[in-house]
Amino acid sequence: MADAVTAQDSAVLEDQHLRRTMGLWQLTAVGFSGVIGSGWLLGAMYAANAAGPEAIIGWVVGGGALMLIAYVMPSISAAAFTRAADVGVAAVRTIAGVRYLAPAAFVLASLIVYWAGWTNLREALPVLLVGAVVYGYQQCRAGVDWFDVRVGIWLVGYLIAILIVSGIGSKDFGGTGVIRAPWDSVIVAIIGVIAYELGVRGGVRYLAAHPAPEPYQDTPAEG
């Protein structure tokens, strides 16, 4: 019994030294963990066959683009925590400059996704869209409050909007040419700004409805 109490006290003391913060590298790791797949195994071979030694430049440019895309969802979370802290909803702040870096990253990533072209997006985005809808449905079936699902509906609208613009956008990116360049990119940027704002507001509402527990406070030892 004494050993069990000692182990519990030790766990509490360890918790007292934990810090509920996330920095740039932690957010980057979260984003990368969601986008890394098996493509890198064959990508080097295909790139070398297509471009030879110059493929290294393509890897650098592509890596920068992927880093930006990987930061998209963490950027919304970071901005939501920062804005929630400003209004007293949450006590956690994230990296400095997130108010400017997060929306810029989201808009640029939206443009990169659009510039991938209709040929790729007509297959990739519907899969993501179906996945988002199925996830929300399963959450509702599991008894999750509808409010928790509703705050993420903006993502479904965002994917649908990008898919529509990709289909009727500039022929340079595989569209039908109804919307000519550069107005197609301008529209995608506007969609990105609106989706980002909706995502951050949804995050703030979620934090207000589900406040995080206060971290343990160090207490002076008795005796």
Image: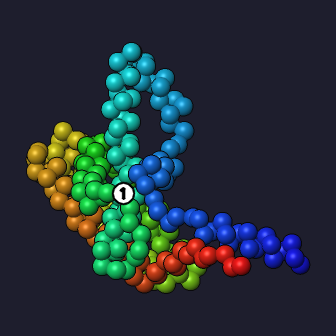
Q: Residue at x 59, y 65 (%)?
A: 17
Q: Position of residue 151 (x, y in %)?
A: 38, 76
Q: Position of residue 106 (x, y in %)?
A: 29, 55
Residue 96, compared with residue 37, is above or below; it is below
What is the crowding at mark 1: few (fewer than 14 residues within 10 Å), some, or many (at least 20)?
some
**Given the current orientation, which residue lies at the most extreme top position?**
53
Residue holding disc 1: 95
Q: Position of residue 149 (x, y in %)?
A: 44, 77
* Quadrant occupied by the N terminus: bottom right
* Quadrant occupied by the C terminus: bottom right
> Count the marks: how many?
1
**Given the current orientation, which residue lies at the most extreme front position?**
223
Frontmost residue, 106 versus 145: 106
Q: In the displayed structure, does residue 3 sit left or right of residue 97?
A: right
Q: Can you tell which quarter of the image residue 84 is in?
A: bottom left
**Given the current orientation, which residue lies at the most extreme right position?**
1
Q: Residue at x 42, y 69 (%)?
A: 92
Residue 147, compared with residue 218, is above or below; it is below
Query: What kind of colouring is applied to the model shown?
Result: rainbow
Q: Residue at x 80, y 72 (%)?
A: 6
Question: Is residue 110 visible in the rendered structure shown here?
Answer: no
Frontmost residue, 150 versus 133: 150
Frontmost residue, 141 versus 151: 151
Q: Mark 1: which secondary structure?
A: loop
Q: In the displayed structure, does residue 149 sit left or right of residue 5?
A: left
Q: Residue at x 51, y 78 (%)?
A: 214
Q: Position of residue 194 (x, y in %)?
A: 22, 66
The amino acid beneath tag 1 is: Ile
Question: Is residue 88 visible in the rendered structure shown here?
Answer: yes
